[in-house]
Structures are given as structure tokens and as C-alpha cells.
Amino acid sequence: MDEYVANRKKEEKIVKKIRTKFKRWKIGRWFVFALALLVVYSIINNAITGVEELTRGAEGILVYILGIIAFALLPFIAMLIAYAISMGGGRDILLARSAEKVYLDSTQLRNVFTPNFKQITKADIVEICVPYENIREMIWKQDLCRLEITAEHKIILTNYDVSSENTVADKPVILYGYFNSMDKMLNQLESYTNKKITGRN
């Protein structure tokens, strides 16, 4: 049996690469740009309109500076929030699994991980089992850096040492390309299944 371990540095690289594919980034960056212009406008406008405060000595200078900061603060905070949201495209999907591993033996693929969002997946451990004989198609999506396996598979959820098992036929198994020795894994999959991975260079 061969074990493949997810690499967090590779995971972060993929997040940076594919977030530009998400609508959240495509639309959000324009909000960030607009809010940045609003911050600049607010600073310039208040610097010009409050210039009389500078004639009142040290107290006037303090009021002048605080006035500029106060009026620019709200759009600046909004800009930071918009930036954080737009940068988050793909993160909730890619970073949803901890301690992720893939095991390949002569009969099946096993994907084991701890879900990071327990409110979505109520389990301490998730195990996905894909018998090679059930695999209908394997597609490498280059733009999303992931392998999509179309196959009937089992999902085993373990929560507080109690396990439940479900069979899934209508959703693909997705493996992102952040595992160590990813090429070796894909080569082994092609060898074990006797199927080519579509879209792989």
C-alpha cells in the first residue's frame, strides 16, 4: 500500500493560483479598487477643506489630523473587509481538510482526512473509499489543479468512535494537486485502473 500526504505549502500555492478563477475574486477586486479610491478621495478632500485648522496651532493640527483619519477610517475598514472576502475565493474549499492522506492498494483508493468545518461535516474523521472497478472516468482539471474521479464510492463518517457509511453515485471524488509525489500517485492510478486520466499533460 502506498501513502500520499497533503503538503500545506503546496495547498497554499494552489489557493493563490486558482482564487482568480472564482467570481468572488473577479468581482471583489473591483469593490476593493473603488473603496481604495474612496479612501484617497476622503483623505484629499478633508485635507483641503480642513486646512484652516492648521492656523490654530498645535490643537488645530491635532484636530486636522484626527479629522482626516476619522473620515477615511470607515471606507478603509470596508476596503479591508472587501479585500479579505475577495481573497477568500477557493480557500473554504481547498482548506476544508486537515491531515489529508490518500492510500492506494491493488483494489481501491482511500482518501482520509479530518474536516475543518464541523458545522458542515459532523465527523472527526472522513474516509472515502473508491474501488477501482467502479471508476468510470478520471479527469484532471488543470485550471482548478484537481483530479475528478467519477465513480460510485463509499463515505465513512466517524464521530466520537461511531461510524456511519453512505454510498454516493452522483458526485465525483475530488483530489487537489497538493499531495507529495502527485505525479507518482496519478501514474499509479492509471496503472491500477487501466484507464487514462483525461486532461493530464
Image (cartoon, rainbow, N blue to C red):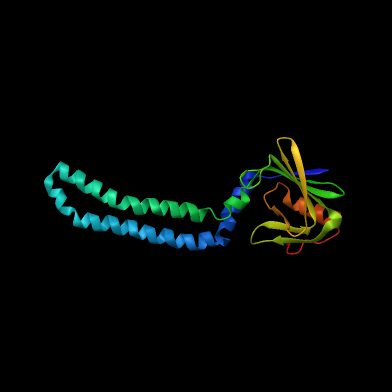
Residue 167: image location, x then y, percent: 79, 52
Q: Looking at the picture, does residue 124 appear above or below residue 45?
A: above
Q: How many marks?
A: 0
Q: Report the residue at 62% width, 52% height from top.
A: 93
Q: Report the residue at 67% width, 61% height from top.
A: 142
Residue 49: image location, x then y, percent: 19, 57
From the image, which quarter does the N terminus lie in?
A: top right
Residue 171: image location, x then y, percent: 73, 58
Q: Report the residue at 36% width, 52% height from top.
A: 76
Q: Is residue 49 left or right of residue 143?
A: left
From the image, which quarter does the C terminus lie in?
A: bottom right
Q: Is residue 128 left or right of residue 57?
A: right
Q: Is residue 39 left or right of residue 193?
A: left
Q: Is residue 11 left or right of residue 104?
A: left
Residue 26: image location, x then y, percent: 51, 63
Q: Looking at the picture, does residue 99 appear above or below residue 40?
A: above
Q: Foreground: 30 or 13?
A: 30
Q: Residue furthest left?
A: 56
Q: Residue furthest top?
A: 161
